[in-house]
Amino acid sequence: MEWNPDPRIATVAEKLYGAIDHLELYVGLQAEGTQPVAKGTSFCPGHTISYATLVDAIALIRGDRLFTADFTPHNLTAWGFADCARSPENPGFGSMLGRLFLRTLPDEFSENSAYAWFPLMTPKAIDEVLTELGQKEKYDLVRPRIARGAHEFKGYGEVSGILRNKEKFRHPFLPRVVKVIRGPGFFLSTDTPERGEREQRQVFKALADTPEKVDAITKFFYENSKALIAKESYRFVDGKRSGLDIVRDVFRVVPIQWVATQVVSETSRMMSKADQKLLFLRRPESRSGSPWMTPKIPSLRQSSSTS
């Protein structure tokens, strides 16, 4: 009766196995009495499975170095450390599964989808619990839809036609990005093509207001793209063709190189020494031999020592 309070199951098991010590593991786990189901609960196994799950989780936390000494902003950056932290204010009351679903399947779930934030609960249970909590109106209870398939375009004419037709082809991430990026200047998040083109011209004018600057930028992108294509290309087995992930190895890299070597260096050159001290910290004992270091990121060890 301690293994299963239901007398029918306990009696049958006793007749089949004779003693509790003779009970097979798999049968015992499946037929063991479970915890009572309550509203808001989605994981109600038996005592043995619960105990094994908790022991395994505690062992992982205590034995995995990534969750102990190295789990600090110093190693993960301040953004990475905050991104891994549990947030009780999110729609899932601290759940991490909802964040995982929204990042992996952003087109299938809305940002407040109850199916994403409470994936281990049935729709009926979700409705009852949220109604009881008085928060039903904050969630989208519509069943997730299947994302539309991607269309493949191979010709240059098709791609250029899409880029020119800004009325029909809009950025798919516009509804999400406007909640994060607001104000003039962010032409990718504007609601009208006219405003976007106007702000885009303003940005271009600030970066290259003379023909000489335009030529310099063009030359930089051409030469660095050509160098990366030659460096990152690889030969196929037949030896006649070459392959390259041009988005990963070229398109993502060249703009970063340009900003780091041209924009940032030019801005730093024009800044006064007082302003530069706000961006860099002096460290004579630098191992690299350079007296400058990047802006300091607060670490967990530093926080504990100051407190």
Image: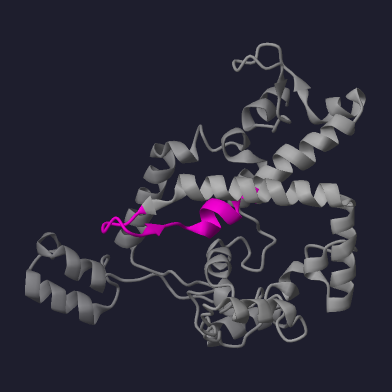
Q: Is residue 82 visible?
A: no
Q: Going 32% across and 54% down the picture, which residue do you hit?
A: 52
Observer-nearest of 213 and 204: 213
Could you tell me which quadrant the N terminus lies in?
Answer: bottom left
Q: Going 8% across and 70% down the picture, which residue do you hit?
A: 17
Q: Going 33% across and 66% down the picture, which residue do you hit?
A: 46
Could you tell whether 32 is left or right of 246 in the image? Answer: left
Q: Is residue 259 visible?
A: yes
* Residue stretch rendered in magenta on the structure: 235-254
Report x, y in % for residue 173.
69, 72
Q: Going 88% across and 65% down the picture, which residue do you hit?
A: 199
Report x, y in % for residue 44.
41, 70
Could you tell whether 67 is left or right of 211 in the image? Answer: left
Residue 248 drawn in magenta: yes
Residue, far top: 285
Observer-nearest of 132 and 288: 288
Observer-nearest of 108 and 306: 108
